[in-house]
Amino acid sequence: MITQYKNIATEFTETVFRFGPKQSLLGILSEPVGVGAQERPTVVLFNAGIVHRVGPFRMNVDIARQLSRCGFRCLRMDLSGLGDSGIRSGKLSSKERALLDAKDAFDGLEELGAEKFVVLGLCSGAFNAFQSACTDPRVVGLVSIDGIAFPTDGFRRREVTRKMNYRFVRNAIKRRLVGCDDVAVNEGEALAENEFFSVEENPERCQSQFHELKDRGVKMNFIYTGGFEDFNGESQFEEMFGAVPNDQVQLKYFAESEHTFPIAEHRRVLVDWICEWASLMWQ
């Protein structure tokens, strides 16, 4: 289904964007030069765990800049209390804070002419993106990277085989060794293990929310990696949601990639996939 995308803007600008209560929240806004970005939804990228807005291994920077070359305005934001964003007052859960932060970002971007949004995130960022899509009708697209996943009977059967796999055993050993030569992989795995991932593991609720988004016409791109221990095969998607990928709902499984994409070539393939998908969905 996906065809090679084209860069329609050779240049883009990047500016600091402040929004939220007393302009205390901050992000970097990337905008294509010479292209009517208002014709496409604005992409909002969430933090992955406690990593600030650049994302693990600058993943969010790569995605935002390439999407801008494809004609999309992008905001890679810091949630309240992360990166350069101030702390939001009040006794709120991490989910409640993230939803308010997202709403403030959408409201601020509306002042620039944005009307519709695509939300994107990795791990906890994917969960926050999913929840903001469920609660805000202005969201028309979702990119979820190693996000919502819960065990199924098929998952449990495959997990027996997976734990006997050489790669699984190798990575388990590496996580326990000090001074391993493969610094990039160790760093990526450390980030994954230390992420603050507040997820409601309620399969029925997740299924209901997924179908609400589907009925609303939200275009969704679910991406999973072989380094994500909660997902172990493409068939798990249908097992979880009772739906097969189609023109509206895309699924991509990067079986050889680590959770935080520490390898540059894997990140490049990820960025290309996201840009191809977005360019096709909003030509």
Image (tube, rainbow, N blue to C red):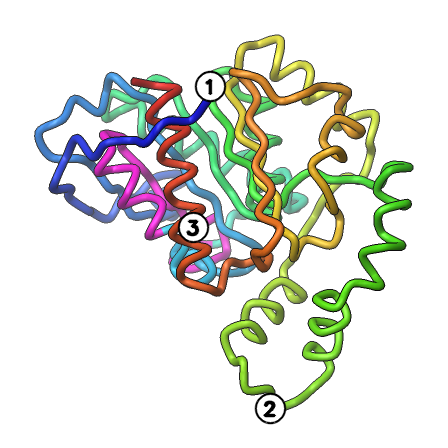
Pick the front one: 200 or 189: 189
Q: Which residue type does callout 2 highlight?
A: Gly
Q: Image point 76% across, 35% down: which residue?
A: 236
Residues rendered magenta in the picture: 61-86
Q: Which residue type does callout 1 highlight?
A: Val
Residue 179: which numbered mark, if any?
A: 2
Tell whether 64 sits left or right of 6: right
Rendering coords of residue 222 (x, y %):
58, 34
**How far is the residue under mark 1 from the one under mark 2?**
45 Å
Q: Image point 55% across, 26% down: which residue?
A: 250
Q: Residue furthest left?
A: 34
Q: Determine contact: label 3, label 1, CB under 8 Å.
A: no
The disc, 3 or 1, on the residue closer to the chain's N-terminal end is 3
Tell whether 281 sits left or right of 179: left
Q: Which residue is mark 3?
A: 78
The disc, 1 or 2, on the residue closer to the chain's N-terminal end is 1
Q: Image point 33% across, 52% down: which residue?
A: 61
Pick the front one: 97 or 243: 243
Q: Determine contact: label 1, label 2, CB under 8 Å.
A: no
The disc, 2 or 3, on the residue closer to the chain's N-terminal end is 3
Q: Determine contact: label 2, label 3, CB under 8 Å.
A: no
State whether residue 169 is above or below residue 115: below
Looking at the image, how many numbered discs can be counted on the residues? 3
Q: Give the structural element (helix, strand or loop) at label 3.
A: strand
Rendering coords of residue 133 (x, y %):
55, 25
Rendering coords of residue 138 (x, y %):
45, 18
Q: Nearer the viewer, mark 2 or mark 3?
A: 2
**How far is the residue under mark 3 from the one under mark 1?**
21 Å
**How far is the residue under mark 2 from the one under mark 3?**
32 Å
Q: Which residue is mark 1?
A: 140
